[in-house]
Amino acid sequence: VDISTKDGIDRAVHMNLIPSNIVDVLHTPLLHDATKLFTKPFVSQARVFTVLRHPIDRATAVYKYVRESRIQGHEDLQSMTLEEYAASSYVENNWLTRFLTEKLSPEKKLTEKDVQVAKEVLRRKVLIGMYDDILESMQLFQSHFHWTEDEDDLVTQCTERAAEEGMSKEESVDPPLEEGSEAWNLLMEQNQYDMDLYMYARALHQYQLDRVMGRRRLIDEKDIEGEFEIDEELYSMDVPESKKEVVPIPPLWKDW
């Protein structure tokens, strides 16, 4: 079953993929369409997890991928420099904020309110890993989903080796874009909302690490009793504290 397409998702629904309990993890870029896989009350609620990347690095990677893949209809990209791409209509504009708020169309104008909505979606719905902290992010996912035992050193070593090899390979081919360069500044203009969201996501990632890994440590220490206390200040960064002032999230996110 290929759930990277809408037809594949429909096929998975028809096959009762989720109620069959034969899969534990799904990977799809069509997150909103995939909600139909988890129709209540027949299945449990899913948990979204992802790895986020610095918006400038992400935009640069998209440029290189599209350019090297020679995607039909984008032939003129083959002769574009990164600077030319960053100033063209091809460049992505605050992609993550748009995706989380369901405003992918460039015609839909973003506002500060959309950034707050996107932050609320991340805060309430997503377990966050960071691309530049991939090893610790893998530990977060493993701990949260109970994928491995704490003493499974072989699995840990294999995971770390695969991650390090992948990262070093990419870095050797694609050195980081220099901050303050023309291309950097142009891409930053297109991703100002995403930068705000990214910095919030980093703080949220650190909170989730502290919370999940901290809970695991308390479980290991049998002599410690009581509920694990957490610091909500970081978790609530830029989110209204009053319970009466709730940031509404897009309807489709309520199914996750």
Image (cartoon, rainbow, N blue to C red):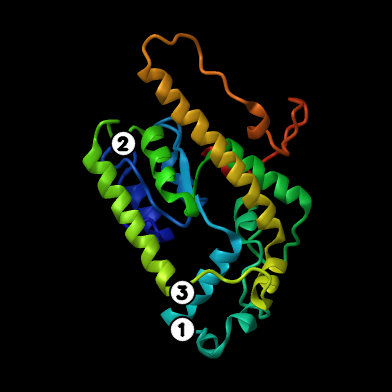
Query: Looking at numbered disc 2 in the image, what kind of residue is underneath it?
Result: Trp
Q: Position of residue 120 (x, y in %)?
A: 65, 40
Query: Looking at numbered disc 3 in the image, what kind of residue is underneath it?
Result: Tyr
Q: At x 60% / y 71%, what residue is drawn?
A: 178
Q: Which residue is mark 3?
A: 65
N-term-proximal mark, 1 vs 3? 3
Tell me if residue 154 can be seen.
yes
N-term-proximal mark, 2 vs 3? 3
Left or right of 213: which side holds 77?
A: right
Q: Which residue is mark 2?
A: 147
Secondary structure type for disc 2: loop
- Above or below: residue 178 compared with residue 79: above
Q: Which residue is mark 1?
A: 72
Q: Position of residue 161 (x, y in %)?
A: 29, 53
Q: At x 25% / y 31%, what residue is drawn?
A: 151
Secondary structure type for disc 3: helix
N-term-proximal mark, 2 vs 1? 1
Answer with the quarter of the image where residue 84 lies. bottom right
Instruction: Please name which of the two marks, 2 or 1, marks the residue nearer to the observer.
Output: 2
Query: Looking at numbered disc 1 in the image, what kind of residue is underneath it?
Result: Gln
Q: Nearer the viewer, residue 102 or 69?
A: 69
Q: Nearer the viewer, residue 199 or 20?
A: 199
